[in-house]
Amino acid sequence: MKSNTVLFFSVLLLLTFAVTILAELPGEELTQEHLDQIFQQHYTEPTGSSLQKLQPLRGDSWLEEAMKTWEAPPLSTQQASDNTLIPFGKGGVFIPRFTETSFEPDLEIYSSDREYILSGETGKTYALEPGEYRVVLGSGSHRQRITKDVTVEEDRTVALMPKWSGLIIDVVDENGQPFRGEYELARIDQFEPYGRGYGASPEMGESVRTWILEPGIYKIFGVGEGYHTLSNFVTVRLVPGELTRFLLIQDKATNDIRGGGMVQMAQTSSITPSWRYGANVGGNVHFAADIKRDVEPYTRNTSLNLNLLFDTWLVYRRKPADWNTRFRIEQGFNVSDWDITDMTSYPDKMTINSLFIWRFLPWLGPYSRMELVTSFFPEHIKRDDEKWFSFVDSDSVFNPAIGFDSSKSFEAQPSFSPTTFDLGAGVNADLATFRYFESKLRVGVSSKYSRYADRYRRFEKSNIKYNEGDSLEYAEKISNSITLQKEKNADIFEFGPQFSLGAMLRIGRYATAEAELKLFAPIAPVQRFRSPDYDFSSVLSWRLTRYLTLDYFYRRTLKQPADLDIPDDNSSHGVWLRLHFSSR
């Protein structure tokens, strides 16, 4: 009994002592409230006058989820593959990339007292003396670029958390073909205009540049439109740490925006890790019958439209090679009033194109390309309310020997006309990348062949000339006809060097200037070295105040192949003074 009493008090004394020791242990209790507070301290960062809060994700961190959108490897893989040596006594800072380094704007590093230290590319480690530094990166003028403060410690490399956003805008026409369209970009939740952007030109082996921007809501709109335009625009929301790939659809002739969104343009299936393929097959049938009851007797018009699409592609991507081949057929048929003999075909286009790029250096790489475009069926002109087709000769004189044609439609262009075949090869090079200046050069050779068979075009009736005595006899009849003029056959072949030079200059903190010159100087069959085709464009954008911007644009184009009757010679310039204000 006595021993049990002693044992009981001994255990009680030990428990009391243990509780006293545990109560005095260092540390804090890890409650859920405390964990949320720590996350907010680490993953909340000032952007302008407000805080951009990143909420924790269930299962994965926000960064792991964001990295799934990158075209570059994850941050840890990028850092592990970087072979930069940090000298003894120094530390390092690593700035990750979303895409290829050559596609993203360069960065700058300043000391804490704003002294310039160095500039370079994303995706690399930079060795620095221990201390406080400021990293400046992103798109736009110098004032619009993103700034991040970082502390460098001796013998340690710190990775900068990518809380900025990436945006790639692929510009295509309404048939899904990439081309060098133009657009403007502005942030609308905290107003910031970023100027003009461009699609990639396949014939010059170009790739789309990546915008590096602060998270927010951005407006993509047609060139020259006001910031508050309610037409010719689309919007996109950029999330911290994520790369957004945006598809912008434009009219190739006017650059008007037809649509857009975060759409994968070419879903692919994998053959091997390097080879991918895909295909789109579709079509539609439309039948319509129109009955007019406001006249006697009633009239009925019927039409049947059939449209078919076949699009397939094959892609090979394995550094340093990139090869993309596409085959596309668009075919449409229209039958009116069930008359098969009066069938017309539109659209009618076959395209085969192939582009090969070998980027053996981040800033330098050769390319080669091929494109074939033709049509399978003749092109017809239909007469609607007119009663005849009439014809003029090459001198614009009415030809009574041909007379009039009363067919419902007339063959204006035969099958496989026009047919164009284009071959090219060259080199892409980044000439200079400095703090306030960037320039790119593309040099190559191009071989272009175009075949135009017998074809007719509409002729303005007011310009018709008559032989003596014909005007009174035929004028009334011609007024009720569609007048056509025959164009001469043309086989255009040109071979020669082509050249493209682009530059961007940051002027102070608030302005940017961009210019691009494209030249094509054939040497065969006609030597036109002194009279080349060229396309020059320039844009100056100046942020005068927070609410007022000034833009100036100039463009000059000249195309003068020897076998065409009329050269393409145009110039244009404009000044936009644009005001933005909205109450929030």
Image (tube, rainbow, N blue to C red):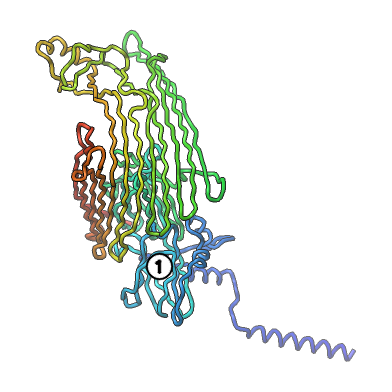
Mark 1 Cα-neighbour bin, 10 Å: few <14, some 14–19, many ≥20: few
Compared with 288, 372 (above or below) is below
Q: Residue furthest right?
A: 1
Asked which quadrant contains residue 440, the reply is bottom left
Residue 142 appears left or right of 208: left
- In this view, the residue in front, 65 or 409, is 409
Asked which quadrant contains residue 390, the reply is top left
Question: Which quadrant does the N terminus fall into?
Answer: bottom right
Identified at 30% across, 55% down, the residue is 441
- Residue 173 picture location, percent across and down: 37, 40
Q: How many dots with numbers?
A: 1
Question: Which quadrant does the C terminus fall into?
Answer: bottom left
Asked which quadrant contains residue 530, the reply is top left
Secondary structure beneath dot 1 equals strand
- Residue 511 picture location, percent across and down: 24, 60
- In this view, the residue in front, 111 or 328, is 328
Q: Which residue is mark 1?
A: 46
Compared with 191, 258 (above or below) is above
Residue 415 appears left or right of 527: right
The answer to whether any part of residue 347 appears in the image is no
